[in-house]
Image: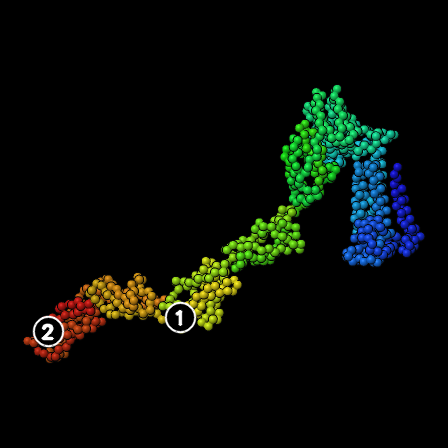
Amino acid sequence: MFRPATIRNTRAGLLGALCLLLAIGGNSGAFRVSADVDPLNAPYELVPFSGDSTLRDFTAQHLNDPDLWPTILRINDLTSVADLSPGTVLQLPVVQVALADEALAMSLTAIQKATAEGARLFAPLQIGDAISDRDTAVTRRGEGEWRQVVDYAGSSTDHAVEAFEIAVAQRDRAAEALITDIHGRVEGRDPAEAVWSNRALDDVLVEFERVRTLTNSTTQVTFRDLSRLRLNPNSNATIQRMRSDPLTGKEVTKVSLQSGDFYALLNQLSDQDSFEIDVPGIQTTTESDDFWIKKQDDSALFVNYDTAALDIESGSAKVSLGQDEGVVITDAGVTARAEVLERTLLSQPADKSEVFGRAVDLSWQVFPEASGYWFEVARDPGFNRMIMTEWGVKDTGFRVEALTPGVHFWRVAALDKLGLPGKWSETRAFELRIDETPPFLTVLAPQDATLVENGAIEVLGAAEAGAVLTLNGTPVTISKDGSFVVQAPLKVGENQLVLVALDAAGNKSEKRRNVTYVRQEAVRIDLDAGLARQGDFLVSRTPEMTVLAATSAPSGLDALLRDAVGAEVGRTRIGTGGRLAMTVPVGPQVQDYRLEVVSLAGRLVGDLEFSVQLDTQAPEIVLDVPPPRATSEQTLDLTGVFGDAVSLKLDGEELEMFDDFFATQIALAPGRNTFELRAEDAAGNVGVLAIETLLDLEPPEIASAEMLRPNGDAGPIEIVVTATDEGGLRQAAPYLVEVGDAEFEGYLRCDSRAGVCRASLPASQGEMSLIEVIVQDYAGNEAFR
């Protein structure tokens, strides 16, 4: 029997033996070291490379492991095999490799012996540490870290020894079983409990303890010899007997299945061990290590996957199932026997593939004879830590949700028409990863809103290596360094380039670029019809003028303004709809300019010449006949000229303009009438003429008329008439008077402001008499007195 002390003594003696070996001497021409020197620090052995064989064969010859050739290159500061030439002396870690391999072999032996004693069940932490340390040691060996190999292998051996001691001590105790996996809700009831209670991972089960799984729940019961029972959902079983005979070492286990189903993988350590399955009304004895049993309301189903027989007895019916055989036994003893279906072929995901997200879509190929499928997902390849099991799946696929990151394993079995599960498919693994970061994607060219004159454009950028890249749905190749370049065809007008990068996890990055393809065509330029013009010139009453034009060019092209000598004096860009606006300087002299439109490549595609002049002089309105001061006519005729005006208005109303004159008739209202003639030229200069006249239909009002001798009877005679009129009095008012026997006639001189008309006569004797006086206004109305 394996004893821990043997391991420790062997390990201690290993280093001593190697030290002695080194002290006596190694290969001829090698080296010698003292026995008290740490052999791991011994100099590397110097061996010339003959070149007759490959470096791999050379490494196998001297280190007994061809896979260490990269380590040889690293030790000798060589970057590749090509740097080797015949005769090159190589340093080889012969002693270090021997020490490392011996330590690894010792740890493996210790692990195997501890496992055989049940360490995986009774000392899972210790044996787990032993395996983990040994795996680390193996990794360090590939890296050439020899001291770490020995240290980790030694630690592995120590953990294995500890696991061995615990297992041996546990096997001397009364037989028990452990719950080594739980998925969902599992309940138990030991002989001392009156009701069911929850069971947890690593709970100990004793004789006569009942265990049941609820819906969508599974559990695994592991016995001391590592035999395992996997109870599937809605199953109920009782551990009827667990006995261990210390004298003979015989293990006796008996399990009763009341309902549901379980899958059994036995690990009987000797021919003396026995494992019995009891189904109500049916007795079984088995040497099989791999079988499945299901209890239904009126029948029981059995499948044997092992070469050893599974013997079943129900009343008078006896059945012995060979490998890959199954049977259905009813409560009445009727049996239906069949060979189980062959393996189902799996489809997706592929073995050892990566799956991103928190769910996986499992799929498999159709099995023609299948009535359904049974699949399992677990955290380990032995399906000891179950994640999900589903029975009776009708489709050839299933989506498993709510998974955690890590490696998962899955398999599928086809169910025949009797409900018997066939052979398990191959076991596949997939690694679930959570990746919610969009892949890297950048576009270096073109920039957004780019204008081009060619029918294709180069798209340049970089994307995450391994991503799937498309441009408007067409695949784009990404180089090893992540860069990409592709020609994108364009249609005339606006084009949208959509780059989409999709990583394996389904994360998406998207970049968009808008590119306008403008075909090289002649551009038409037309000045805006609303610009101020005077003949062939544009005119402005300010020193600057904004010139508007419409073009057939697309937006974004450059427009240039050049003077008479061709110098550039302004630049702008064509706006939406081909519109452009340019401010030009204006002077009193005619100035010539040229508008040019150039393509993206700088080629002239259209031009237009025009001239501009400063005009600050308002148009002059000249009437042919000035309007009368007053009139009795109810209409007034106006005619005249308007200079360079382009618009003529009378009190805001447009007047008809003839070639170089105007003529209109105005209706007058009684009283004073005022009008405004307004002329405006093309530059916006405005000339104004005010017109005023009086429509007078009433004669003057004579207030008094008298003849006076202010200086006495011998003095001159004065005729004084006072009168008023709104339109004013004419300067002359005819009169007829009589003095004595003589008559005098003449004209009074009227002062319209004072409202007085006067005239003087020489001194005459006689009686004065005012026969007649006529006072007129400017409208021709007369008043008599």
| Mark 2 → mark 1, Cα distance in angstroms | 71 Å
Q: Position of residue 325 (x, y in %)?
A: 73, 29
Proximity of marks 2 and 1: CB atoms separated by less than 8 Å: no
Q: Position of residue 551 (x, y in %)?
A: 44, 61
Residue sitting at 80 percent across and 38 percent down? Answer: 120
Q: Position of residue 598 (x, y in %)?
A: 49, 64
Number of other residues with Cα within 10 Å of mark 1, as a class: few under 14, some 14 to 19, many 20 or more: many
Q: Is residue 246 above or below residue 105?
A: above
Residue named by callout 2 = 737
Tell me the amino acid under the disc marked 2. Val
Mark 2, secondary structure of its residue: strand
Q: Position of residue 514 (x, y in %)?
A: 54, 55
Residue sitting at 84 percent across and 50 percent down? Answer: 61
Tell me the amino acid under the disc marked 1. Gln
Quadrant containing the N terminus in the rendered view: top right
Q: 470 or 733, which lies in front?
A: 470
Q: Which mark is residue 82?
A: none
The answer to which of marks 2 and 1 sits earlier in the sequence is 1
Residue named by callout 1 = 613
Quadrant assignment, res 746:
bottom left
